Image: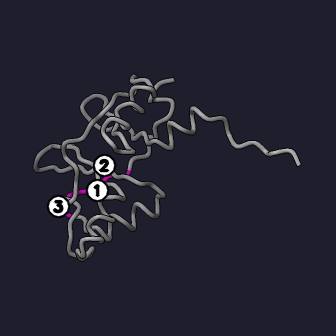
Amino acid sequence: MLVRDAMSTLILTLGPAHTLRQAACLMSGRRVGAAVVLDPETSGVGILTERDILNSLGAGHDPDRETVGAHTTNNVVFCTPDATLQEAAEAMAHGGFRHLIVLADGGPVGIVSVRDVIRCWVPARRTVPA
């Protein structure tokens, strides 16, 4: 199975000037654990995860003053839609993260998460006979 079969193509994108509170509200509203950060100044692609927000809050930062740009991971590991789920899972396990941005034609086309991989590899929940 390929990443294209598992990835989410509805990507939440943020700019570096968004506050962490804005990011948290948008991520919560969309029920996603990560957002792609597009910085027009650098033409770079980064990622902000729920863990980045938690780490900032845990350090006592004010979510209304802290910006997404200050907490974005910019040295992102990417994959392509043609990568296998095995390759994506290995990259996530090796790197210790739960989301991979999927790139094609020079831009983000999706995100694949550990949950997406599990959903594809494990059969849907079944009703247990009484």
Distance in Å between CA atoms under marks 2 and 3 = 14 Å
Q: Main secondary structure of the magenta part?
A: loop
SS at badge 2: strand
Q: x%, y% of residue 45?
A: 22, 44
- Residue 36's label in the rendered image is 2
Residue pictured at 27% horizontal, 73% vertical = 63
How many other residues sit within 10 Å of disc 2, few (<14), some (14-19) or many (≥20)? Answer: many
Residue pictured at 32% horizontal, 68% vertical = 22
Q: Which residues are magenta?
A: 12-17
Residue pictured at 54% horizontal, 38% vertical = 118
| Residue 45 vertical position relative to residue 102 in the rendered view, above or below | below
Taking depth in this image into account, of 55 and 28 the one nearest to the observer is: 55
Q: Which residue is mark 3?
A: 70
Distance in Å between CA atoms under marks 1 and 2 = 6 Å
| Residue 65 vertical position relative to residue 77 in the rendered view, above or below | below
How many other residues sit within 10 Å of disc 3, few (<14), some (14-19) or many (≥20)? Answer: some
Does 51 appear in magenta? no
* Mark positioned earlier in the residue sequence (2 or 3): 2
Q: Which residue is mark 1?
A: 14
SS at badge 3: helix
Distance in Å between CA atoms under marks 3 and 1 = 13 Å
